[in-house]
Image (cartoon, rainbow, N blue to C red):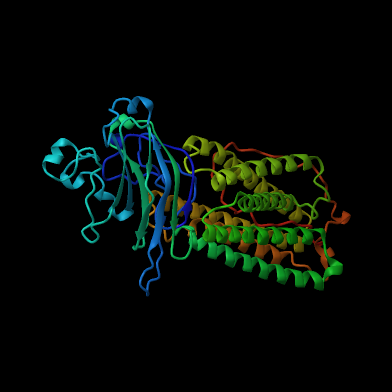
Amino acid sequence: CGCRGEAPARVSPFSRSPSPSRPAARTRPSTSTPVAALRRAPTHSSSTAAARASTLPNPPQTPPTPSSGAFDIVTFRRSQESATRHEEMQQKTGLVEAIIVEIQDRDKIGGSYLHSDAICCTPELDKEKSCKVGEVIIRPNPDNPDWPKRIQTFFDGKNEETTMGTQSVSINKTGMYYLYFMFCDPQLRGLKITGRTVWRNPHGYIPGKMAPMMTFFGFMSLAYLALGLLWFLQFVRCWKDILQLHYHITAVIALGMCEMAFWYFEYANFNSTGTRPMGITLWAVTFTAVKKTVSRLLLLVVSMGYGVVRPTLGGITYRVAALAIIYFTASEALELVENLGNINDFSGKTRLFLVLPVAILDATFIIWIFSSLSRTLEKLQLRRSMAKLELYRKFTNSLAMSVVISIAWIGYELYFNATDPLSELWRRAWVIPAFWSVLSYVLLAIICALWSPSRNPTGFAYSEETGDEADEEGLSLVGSAVKGTGDIVNMHVFTEDKRA
């Protein structure tokens, strides 16, 4: 299960953790204060030290090959004040426990089966010989007494630092696993962790939640390649009648193909090496941000009737360009944080600070696009340009349908996340992000069909005879924190209408 990570981390006393029924409800071993935050590298069989969960798919019809995990040079450092409270020759002056638990066994952490809300063993519970004072209460799984897995590391004397011995863990059961670093001694408050954990699945380092996405990106790369070949054949067949619009569509197809290919190779490299090189990931993230921006920008320009009811954008060119630049910057920043940042680098408020601008800009694009479409349809209807009107009606219907589907999917996504806070449905989680890529591709295919190169392109191009004017488009902004509908405007449309 593929995780390699290195980063300092802070641990807080587990005595302040939540009740036993919710030990795995967060991505940290403790809910009160931040805990271990090793570098983001999701795993197949277990989580990182920040309790990031992962999964282990095993072959269903053959004896399962165990997934493996290893703690490599994990060091714990306590405060000087905590260390000086003990004698030099005293042994076991502090205990830190690494606990690996499958999500279905989360109720076995803590004293719930002892009718207690305690996470750590108390003298009263020790009298019942159910646990040891100073240790986290763990009830073994009756089907597998060695699980949940506990690995203990002790401080000696006045030492401020101790290192966990090299440990290997084999996992034979498919599931979502969490890794916690816990301590019960309040004197260890402020404990810091540095080190690396490595987890590998039988088929590679990529985590179970991410594994289907690698296959998905491979299929999407082939799908864009097929669409590109069909478009290229039609492009060559009618190359003497090509409009500027067709070059734009070609560019978006190429962007989509490159985006999917980069993501596939990024995931494949992660699966084989256990690391995510910043260079490959940065290229994939940048292609994603560029494609989103270009798609929304060109869709907006087409909706304004550029090349159909107006020969130029006139005075709004700078506003359109400014919106595109701002959107690219915001989108790139969000993608970089999500794909290159550490697990606990950003709080919820910081993440909201990055998500909110993208959501507002998406809402701005949607409002501007549909208001422009309304004006364009009205002008075409008044001028009785029936061929152009029919084309734009089909285009509008496609956009409207995508919005309806996107809103429905957002509702499902919210429901899915609300009902599965612990990622127990990890096998289906990949469908959520994959949907937006599929919707984007379907809309691009529709646009390719509507604006396919033909022998008579001038029938849909702008002409002076229509009396079209290039009046300046007004922009009505609605300040709203509406969530962007994924890639619903990722339709990759660029038009120069054909004259009726």
Residue 376 in view of the camera: yes
Residue drawn 61% across the image and 59% down it? 440
Q: Which quarter of the rendered picture does the N terminus lie within?
A: bottom left
Q: How many marks?
A: 0
Q: Residue furthest left?
A: 128
Looking at this view, is 330 or 197 the one in front?
Answer: 197
Where residue 179 appears, as percent x and y from the top left, is 37, 48
Q: Give left or right: position of 235 versus 203.
A: right
Residue under the image location 77 percent in, 71 percent down: 234
Name the side, left or right, on which 446 lies relative to 130. right
- Left-right relation of 122 to 381: left
Q: Identify the image quadrant of the C terminus.
A: bottom right
Residue 78: which quarter of the image?
top left
Q: Is residue 332 above or below residue 416?
A: above
| 298 is higher (above) or lower (below) than 444 | above
User: As rendered, which of 215 and 141 lies closer to the eye?
Assistant: 141
Location of residue 98 in the rendering, given as x and y in whole percent from the top left corner: 34, 46
Q: Please name the residue shown 47% across and 56% down the image.
A: 2
Indicate the position of residue 285 as horizontal and vertical percent values. 62, 50
Residue depicted at 39% across the width and 50% down the height: 166
Quadrant in which residue 388 is drawn: bottom right
* Relative image position of residue 220 (x, y in whole percent): 60, 65
Q: Nearer the viewer, residue 392 or 195?
A: 195
Q: Is residue 439 visible?
A: no
